[in-house]
Image: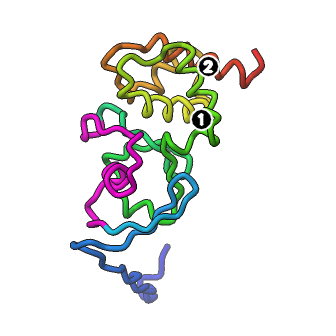
């Protein structure tokens, strides 16, 4: 039973720095490169990537977080960049489709998408590939059903889903030696 007479220590809340509403300096680490941009705190990571850094591989689809075309990684986890504030990514590692290949060497998932024709119009492809690589890293590619479930946040309007699953299976099987 607690002593009702004992004083309860009160801690002062940490002072939060107020930034904005106008343009502020934001330091971002994108694809291993440190970048300084000036933007309003309300700017999404997607718009910062495309409009401030000219990294246009990440696509703006619905701009409401429902299609997955804007999928990137923040600290290795997939996020919808249209729903993520750029300023909230300070001090974190952002990876886009441009950061997936190593020089001229495509990532195995990028090669598999090409080999399996896992794209039609190609618009959703960068987000699909970012999710597909994350899916394998997360260990959610055991079955076609599992792949479909964990890729369900990425919409392909051309319905290339069977080809996308084929590409993911190929990379999964190469990783596991099957």
- Asked whether 117 falls inside the magenta stretch, the response is no
Percent x, y of residue 168: 57, 20
Point out the stretch of residues depicted in magenta: 39-65
**Placement of the C terminus among the 4 image quadrants:** top right
Place residue 172 in its image quadrant: top right
The residue sitting at the left extreme is: 21
| Residue occupying the point 62% across, 37% down | 104
Say how the picture is coloured: rainbow
Q: Which mark is residue 138?
A: 1
Percent x, y of residue 82: 31, 46
Place residue 85 in its image quadrant: bottom left
Q: Is residue 27 above or below residue 95?
A: below
Neighbour tally class for label 1: few under 14, some 14-19, many 20 plus, Cα within 10 Å: few
Percent x, y of residue 6: 46, 88
- For label 1, the SS is helix
Helix, strand or loop: magenta stretch: loop
The residue to which callout 2 is attached is 142
| Residue occupying the point 30% across, 66% down | 39
Side of 59 where 113 appears, left or right:
right
| Residue occupying the point 52% across, 48% down | 95
| Residue occupying the point 54% across, 13% down | 116
The residue sitting at the front extreme is: 104
- Front residue (pair 147, 53): 53
């Amino acid at each position: 039973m607690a002593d009702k007479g004992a004083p309860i220590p009160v801690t002062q809340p940490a002072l939060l720095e107020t930034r904005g509403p106008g343009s502020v300096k934001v330091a971002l680490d994108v694809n291993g490169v440190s970048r300084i941009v000036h933007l309003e705190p309300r700017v999404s990571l997607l718009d910062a990537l495309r409009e401030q850094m000219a990294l246009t591989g990440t696509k703006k689809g619905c701009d409401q977080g429902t299609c997955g075309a804007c999928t990137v990684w923040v600290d290795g986890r997939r996020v919808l960049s249209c729903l993520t504030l750029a300023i909230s990514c300070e001090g974190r590692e952002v990876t886009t489709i441009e950061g997936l290949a190593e020089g001229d060497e495509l990532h195995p998932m990028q090669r598999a998408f090409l080999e399996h024709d896992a794209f039609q119009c190609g618009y959703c492809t960068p987000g699909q590939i970012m999710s597909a690589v994350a899916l394998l890293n997360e260990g959610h590619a055991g079955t076609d059903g599992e792949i479909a479930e964990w890729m369900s946040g990425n919409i392909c309007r051309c319905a290339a889903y069977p080809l996308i699953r084929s590409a993911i299976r190929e990379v999964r099987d190469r990783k596991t030696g099957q």
